[in-house]
């Protein structure tokens, strides 16, 4: 591809595989992800980064693994920048540091602590640390706007969000349940 003036030219290699080969590759990726825990992984996490940052993330994971005498293996969805990393580090304190460094390596290029598997309570502390405080406040505001009563997943990512300090009665919410027939 031609680059724009003043910008580095970029090119992408596209390899088209027969349907059967593509299916086998996808199946192998799935088996690799689900095999990590039975193989003894102490943590399995997913990190998503801009696709162009995948080599940087994987190189960083290699350095983090070597620095900490850990094993970090990965598989994922390269087309969307999502990498599943299995961390083999039995020492809990050292493993915590490895995870912090891995999540920082993902967040630095504009990525996120979690891809399609969600953040949940297990990654809550890791999620909030590298994030921009303004972004976290925006997310809290969105959560408050759509879920002022904190009904789904209370305290899972954000600690309880106060509904309102007002003692005024709140308007009734329509029920999502189907009305019963008399």
Image: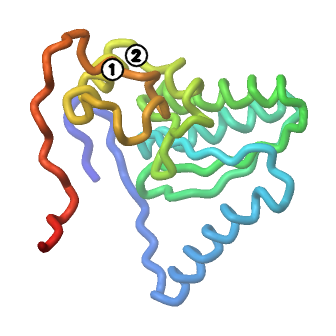
Residue 34 vertical position relative to residue 48 in the rendered view, above or below: below
Which residue is more in the foreground, 45 or 53? 45
**In this rendering, position of residue 130 left or right of residue 93:** left
Mark 2 near mark 1, Cβ–Cβ under 8 Å? Answer: yes
Residue 49 vertical position relative to residue 100 in the rendered view, above or below: below
Residue 85 in view (yes/no):
yes
Which residue is more in the foreground, 24 or 126? 126
Reading the image, the residue beneath label 2 is 132
Residue 75: percent from left, percent from top: 63, 57
Seen at 20% across and 12% down, the residue is 167
Residue 104 in view (yes/no):
no
Residue 139: percent from left, percent from top: 31, 26
Residue 77: percent from left, percent from top: 50, 58
> Which colouring convention does the figure follow?
rainbow
Labelled disc at residue 37: none
Reading the image, the residue beneath label 1 is 135
Which residue is more in the foreground, 122 or 130? 122
């Amino acid at each position: 591809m031609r680059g724009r003036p003043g910008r580095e030219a970029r090119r992408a290699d596209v390899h088209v595989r027969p349907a059967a080969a593509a299916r086998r590759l996808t199946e192998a990726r799935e088996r690799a992800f689900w095999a990590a825990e039975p193989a003894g992984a102490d943590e399995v996490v997913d990190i998503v980064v801009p696709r162009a940052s995948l080599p940087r993330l994987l190189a960083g994971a290699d350095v983090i693994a070597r620095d900490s005498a850990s094993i970090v293996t990965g598989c994922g969805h390269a087309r969307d920048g999502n990498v599943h990393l299995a961390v083999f580090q039995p020492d809990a304190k050292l493993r915590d540091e490895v995870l912090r460094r891995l999540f920082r390596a993902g967040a630095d290029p504009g990525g996120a602590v979690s891809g399609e598997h969600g953040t949940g309570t297990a990654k809550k502390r890791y999620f909030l640390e590298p994030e921009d405080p303004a972004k976290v406040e925006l997310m809290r505001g969105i959560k408050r706007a759509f879920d002022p009563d904190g009904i789904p997943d209370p305290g899972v990512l954000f600690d309880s969000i106060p509904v309102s300090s007002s003692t005024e009665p709140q308007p009734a919410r329509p029920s999502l349940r189907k009305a019963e027939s008399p």
